[in-house]
Image (cartoon, helix red, strand yellow):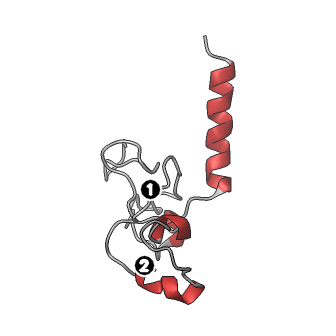
Amino acid sequence: GDNPLGMSYMVGYGKKFPQKIHHRGSSLPSIDKHPQSIKCQEGSPYFYSTGPNPNLLLEAVVGGPDMEDKYDDSRADFPHSEPTTYINAPLVGLLAYFKQHAS
């Protein structure tokens, strides 16, 4: 969290992290709370909700801040709020390297 917002871009890490990531499974209610199927367009009220996602996708790394170090924590801002493999893969590789080469 050494940035102007003082936040981590890894979900669940630290005291301040993204709450509204662009991820369907994280932004929809769990099957325990909503056992009925939610079709694609039926997810819109959850997508446009101003509240935090009901399910934390722990340890997902989002795209992060823009070129001016701003992060709006908005599901609609998917370039910055979506967790993807191309963002996470280098981090996983780096952590695996350090685990293998621990002193």
Sequence-wise, the earlier of marks 2 and 1 is: 2
Residue that appears at 46% across and 65% down: 32
Q: Residue furthest top?
A: 103
User: Relative to 71, does residue 3 appear above or below in the rendering?
Assistant: above
* Secondary structure type for disc 1: loop
Q: Are marks 2 and 1 in contact (CB under 8 Å)?
A: no
Looking at the rendering, in which quadrant would you find the C terminus? Answer: top right
Q: Is residue 76 above or below residue 18?
A: below
Q: Quadrant of the N terminus?
A: top left
Q: Position of residue 63 (x, y in %)?
A: 53, 59
Q: Circle 1 sits on which residue? A: 56
Left or right placement of residue 34 versus residue 3 in this view: right
The residue located at (54%, 70%) in the rendering is 24
- Image position, residue 57 (x, y; %): 50, 55
Q: Position of residue 58 (x, y in %)?
A: 48, 49
Indicate the position of residue 41 as horizontal and vertical percent values. 55, 89
Q: What number is the disc on residue 11?
A: none
Mark 1 packing: few (<14 Cα in 10 Å), some, or many (20+)? some
Type of the residue with mark 1 = Leu
Q: Which mark is residue 46?
A: 2
Q: Is residue 92 above or below residue 36?
A: above
Q: Is residue 91 above or below residue 60?
A: above
Q: Nearer the viewer, residue 51 or 87?
A: 51
At mark 2, the secondary structure is: helix
Residue shown at 68% from the left, 27% from the top? 97
Q: Residues within 10 Å of mark 2 (few under 14, many from 20)?
A: some
Residue nearest the viewer, comparing 81 with 71: 81
Report the Cα–Cα distance between label 2 and label 1: 14 Å
Q: Amino acid at mark 2?
A: Tyr
